[in-house]
Image: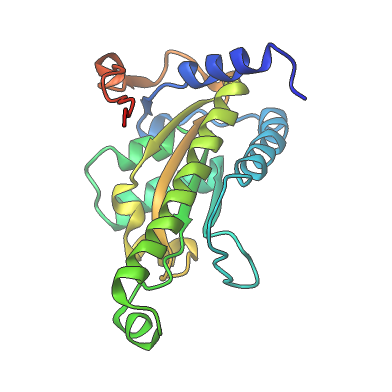
């Protein structure tokens, strides 16, 4: 059984998680030293594995795997190449290339809808309302996995930012990165190792942190 300090520790980590966009120009990238990369590689992989203990309702059964999510990991050099591709090949002028350039690693979490096209919808024996409900279950499960990952990274002192992905979610990037087209990007998780945190990058805090309340809680009385 967890000791009495466990709930307090979990609460501290949840409240410590914060949104911060970290950006830099591709030409200003500071390489991750080999020893730092290797040490943190194991931590990130373990965090992803632990995040995979999120609950899911229906087994997805794609490639023999039950989970309705996938994690595609880009280490620093791959994230740099993705940044260059976004800027030079896809001509992205938004923050995407600068986010990819600034991160120490990037995890693209996708979810796998069962009824992602007209053919899969029409050949299923399940009615459309049930199809939508099942895919909502898969999406909810993958979202829980992403939150688990953010909390694990936070516990290790790593900066992290959940982005919806922008051009990273498009078919061009999926093809470039070898991600199956039937997957849907849920989260581009930009990671900054503790050793790589300095003042050389531009930092933008999330805008909604101070807008939180508890007024959305309703106790039901019957």
In this view, the residue in front, 211 or 194, is 211
In this view, the residue in front, 91 or 189, is 189
Percent coordinates x, y for residue 102 in the rendering: 43, 31
The reply, left or right, for residue 173 in relation to residue 152 is left
The reply, left or right, for residue 46 in relation to residue 104 is right
Give the residue drawn at x 33%, y 45%.
164
Considering only vertical position in the picture, is 127 above or below 184?
below
Percent coordinates x, y for residue 145 in the rendering: 53, 44
Considering only vertical position in the picture, is 77 above or below 128?
above
In this view, the residue in front, 187 or 137, is 137
Percent coordinates x, y for residue 174 in the rendering: 41, 63
Considering only vertical position in the picture, is 178 above or below 103?
below
Locate the C terminus by quadrant: top left
Give the residue drawn at x 48%, y 64%.
179
Locate the N terminus by quadrant: top right
Which residue is situated farthest in the bottom direction here?
123
How many marks do you count on the picture? 0
Asked if residue 79 shows in the view, the reply is yes
Which residue is situated farthest in the right direction here?
1
In this view, the residue in front, 58 or 120, is 58
Considering only vertical position in the picture, is 192 above or below 93?
above
Asked if residue 26 shows in the view, the reply is no
């Amino acid at each position: 059984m967890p000791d009495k300090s466990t709930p307090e520790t979990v609460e501290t980590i949840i409240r410590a998680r914060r949104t911060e966009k970290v950006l830099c120009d591709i030409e200003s990238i500071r390489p991750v030293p080999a020893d730092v990369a290797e040490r943190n590689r194991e931590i990130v992989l373990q965090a992803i594995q632990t995040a995979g203990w999120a609950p899911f309702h229906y087994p997805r059964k794609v490639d023999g795997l039950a989970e309705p999510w996938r994690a595609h990991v880009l280490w620093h050099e791959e994230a740099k190449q993705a940044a260059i591709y976004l800027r030079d090949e896809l001509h992205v002028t938004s923050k995407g290339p600068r986010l990819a350039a600034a991160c120490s690693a990037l995890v693209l979490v996708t979810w796998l809808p069962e009824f992602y096209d007209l053919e899969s919808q029409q050949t299923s024996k399940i009615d459309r309302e049930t199809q939508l409900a099942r895919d909502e279950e898969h999406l909810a499960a993958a979202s829980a996995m992403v939150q688990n990952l953010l909390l694990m990274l936070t516990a290790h002192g790593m900066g992290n930012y959940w982005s919806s992905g922008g051009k990273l979610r498009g078919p061009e990037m999926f093809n470039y990165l070898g991600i199956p087209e039937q997957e849907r990007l849920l989260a581009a998780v930009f990671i900054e190792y503790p050793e790589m945190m300095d003042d050389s990058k531009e930092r933008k805090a999330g805008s909604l942190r101070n807008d939180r309340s508890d007024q959305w809680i309703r106790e039901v009385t019957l």
